Amino acid sequence: MPFNTIDQFVKKNVLAVQDFAILSLRSATNLFRRPLYVSDILIQADLIGFGSLPIVILTGFFTGGVLALQSASALSQFGATGITGQLVSLSMIKELGPVLTSLMVSGRNASGMASELGSMQVTEQIDAMRALGTDPTKKLVTPRLYATIIMSFFLTIISDGIGIAGGAFVAVFMLGQDGSQYFHTAYQVLRFPDVLQGLVKPLFFGTIIATVGCYFGMTTRGGTQGVGRSTTQAVVVASVLIIAIDFVISRFMIGIFGR
Amino acid sequence: MSITTPTAPTIDEAAPQPDPNAPVITFDHVSIGFEGKKVLEDISFTVSRGETLIILGPAGGGKSVLMKLCDGLLQPDSGNITVFGREISHLKEEELYSARAHIGMVFQESALFDSLTVRDNVAYRLIEEHLPDEEVDRRVREALRFVELEDKIDMFPSELSGGMRRRVSIARAIISGPDLLLYDSPTAGLDPITSTTIVELIIKQRDVSHNTALLITHRLQDAFTLVSHRYNEQTKAMEPLPDGELDQNTRFIMLNEGHIVFEGTTLEFILSNDPFIRDYLS
């Protein structure tokens, strides 16, 4: 690869990171600048939150179920099937609830944002908005950002609850375990740092989903093919970032709280 | 899309300058390029109040870029752009919103918001300014009546034909009574009959409101219709100017490969001996 090509490649990527950072920062701080499009935040919260509910419930339920199945199978070798609830609850609340919910929301909404804003970009609707005196980051990005953060938080809580219920369903009806023991151990094992970890993560993941989705949408070039490319890139980048940031947050929280 | 907190552009801040003889637009040695390729190079011209500047040139010559520079949608790499006496080429995006309060723009492909009805598209600026619903409705109907599409008020852009979308786009541009109108290829991709309807609307807007306008077109016949016709308010129709007159407030600019190759009146344009223009006219 010739030097000038490498040079251009690096410059292009550094500029992309810079643009992403500026867009993220501007859309976050827009909350403190007028106009604030409250109704758009509510519309987006409905689309992102309520719209994602079915997939989050289904994913949560079956994840909890399969966790119970696998845990019980492994624990039976040590005669410890009684702590299935502990394993399901800790795994769901600390890791699988936030991560799987965010991956599902990312698949559904980062792609939706990238394609919607991308279509607006290639048909000059974003320019038209600017020409009509409206800041597209305030009108389009900020509502999506805050709606995704808020709804990711609540969707994760729902997913955690449904996951534990799914585990209970499998444990009680398929493995013949005692329901009250399952819920008792599931509850008793939880400590404040576990719950905090599970509730902090969706706030970061929601930010990633919205900023990545909107960034790829707002920078779409090249017609309908470009919209498709942006959509794919948004989901891939958001998913990888979610998993990478999950590792960083987990390490950080374990470092602070020791669990 | 409804809005809850007010921040309409400060009109006073963006008010056109009082000097009636000062140019509305001044381009002073403006250059811009993308990814190392120059699109416009050393462009200088002025547009006076009430004047219509027709921008001609082959595709890819930088006409749309020039139009976006006028509205501050793009920033030049070098040179200065003054609109209504305000230097806009180095303004921040937030400051540009107020500068655009007196500019209406018709985009090449209409650029209507496809998730909004015709009413909400046309009313967009008024809704952002938090005007009362009754006034919004009255002005939307007025603007749609002007473009003869009042009956389409509740339809979505996807339900309209290409020509209708352009007319809605014109209604959206004129609803706030802008002093400067920017038409980016308003007849591109339309059949001749629909193109004539659009040109008639532009002439009507010009002769009724007497505002300044920049118009890009690929169709010479549209340009010549603009200079040779006027709008008759009695008959409510376009008619040729008497005795073969030409509109004195219309000038031409021709762009080729990022440079202005011609600037002048209609007669100077028609009588030009420049081989490129002769070739273009033929």
Image (spheres, coloured by chain):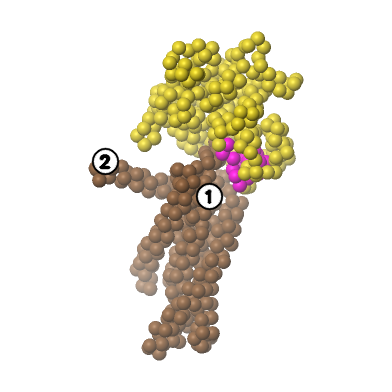
Chain colours: A brown, B yellow
Tell me if residue A96 is in the magenta stretch: no
Residue, disc 1 = A116
Nearer to us in this view, B137 or A250 = B137
Q: Residue at x 58, y 61 (%)?
A: A51
Q: Amino acid at mark 1?
A: Glu
- Residue found 53% across the figure and 70% down from its top: A58
Residue A174 circle label: none
In the current view of this chain or complex, which residue is farthest to the front? B282
Rendering quarter of residue B250: top right
Q: Residue at x 45, y 43 (%)?
A: A222
Q: Is residue B124 magenta?
A: yes
First in sequence, mark 1 or 2: give its number: 2
User: CB of mark 1 within 8 Å of CB of mark 2?
Assistant: no
Span of residues in magenta: B110-129
Same chain for the residues at labels 1 and 2, yes or no?
yes
- Numbered disc 2: secondary structure: helix
- Can you see residue A46? yes
Q: Measure the alpha-carbon separation of dots 1 and 2.
A: 35 Å
Q: Residue furthest top?
A: B243
Asked if residue A208 shows in the view, the reply is no
Residue B105's image quarter? top right
Front residue of A245/B241: it is B241
Residues A85 and B10: in front is A85
Seen in the picture, residue A103 relative to B278 is either above or below; the reply is: below
Instruction: Check disc 2 and give the amino acid type.
Output: Asn
Q: Chain of mark 2?
A: A
Task: Estimate the x, y position of residue A137 in percent, counting from the top left.
Answer: 51, 45
Residue B114 spot, x, y in % from top left: 60, 44
User: Which residue matches tag 2?
Assistant: A4
Q: Is residue A230 above or below residue B58?
A: below
